[in-house]
Amino acid sequence: MPAPITEEQNRLDREVLLDAAERLFYERGIQAVGMDEVRAASGLPLKRIYRFFAAKEDLVVATLQRRDQRWRGDLAAHVGQVPDPRERVLAVFDWLGEWFAQPGFRGCAWINAHGELGSSSEAVLAEVRSHKRAFHDQIAKWVHATGVPVAEPVYLLAEGAIVTAGISADPAPAHQARAAVETLLGTR
């Protein structure tokens, strides 16, 4: 009889599974990737995968949740290095520009998931909305610290830059949005 699987092994296997699924879903699209491909990429048997996630939809939601924590955490760490509130808001767009220029950038994982499953999966739609609300709240907090009431336009410029860069495969929208935000924030 095989040895029981430890909690540590469960944690490691779950991470390997989420890494493989996230990479495949982001590179190729959620609907284009079958669970057999996730199995092959993760090296885990399907039976084990389905013990972690009863359905593909559950796996999609888990990858989006984990990506949200990492993505917003990386953004917050970058912005948090900037002491001046106005420059902190502009740093959002610098970070976006760096993200857009990364090899393999395919736009916003949440917009992509919404486009594929938003009308057919309440769970995915809820996760997309949760991410967008949290991103909005991050930006609103940083903009509020400047004393200039422009949180909504700044958020819309960030979202527009993300969507445009995802379609155009060009980091320029981050720089263009940054210039518009500079104007909105005014001179010191």
Image: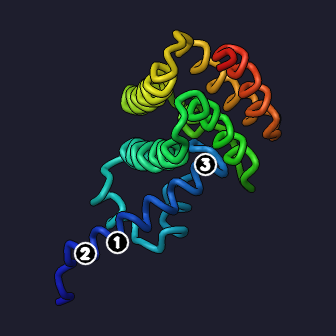
- Going by the image, does 163 lie left or right of 14? right
- Tag 1, which secondary structure? helix
Image position of 57 with respect to 40: above or below: above
Alpha-carbon neighbours of circle 1 within 10 Å: few (<14), some, or many (≥20)?
few
Location of mark 2 (residue): 8
Residue 130 place in picture, x, y as percent:
39, 28
- Tag 2, which secondary structure? helix
Q: Earlier in the sequence, mark 3 or mark 1?
A: 1
What is the C-alpha distance between the residues marked 2 and 3? 27 Å
What is the C-alpha distance between the residues marked 2 and 1? 6 Å
Residue 109 place in picture, x, y as percent:
57, 40
Question: Which residue occupies the foreground of this view, 46 or 70?
Answer: 70
Q: Image point 66% across, 51% down: which residue?
A: 27
Specify the amino acid type for callout 1: Leu
Q: Quadrant of residue 96?
A: top right
**For the N terminus, which image quadrant?**
bottom left
Alpha-carbon neighbours of circle 3 within 10 Å: few (<14), some, or many (≥20)?
many
Disc 2 and disc 1 in contact, CB within 8 angstroms: yes
Q: Is residue 76 visible?
A: yes
- Tag 3, which secondary structure? helix
Q: Image point 72% across, 28% down: which residue?
A: 178
**For the C terminus, which image quadrant?**
top right
Image position of 167 with respect to 153: above or below: below
Specify the amino acid type for callout 3: Tyr
Location of mark 3 (residue): 26
Q: Image point 75% across, 28% down: which residue?
A: 164
Location of mark 1 (residue): 12
- Total numbered badges shown on the rendered structure: 3
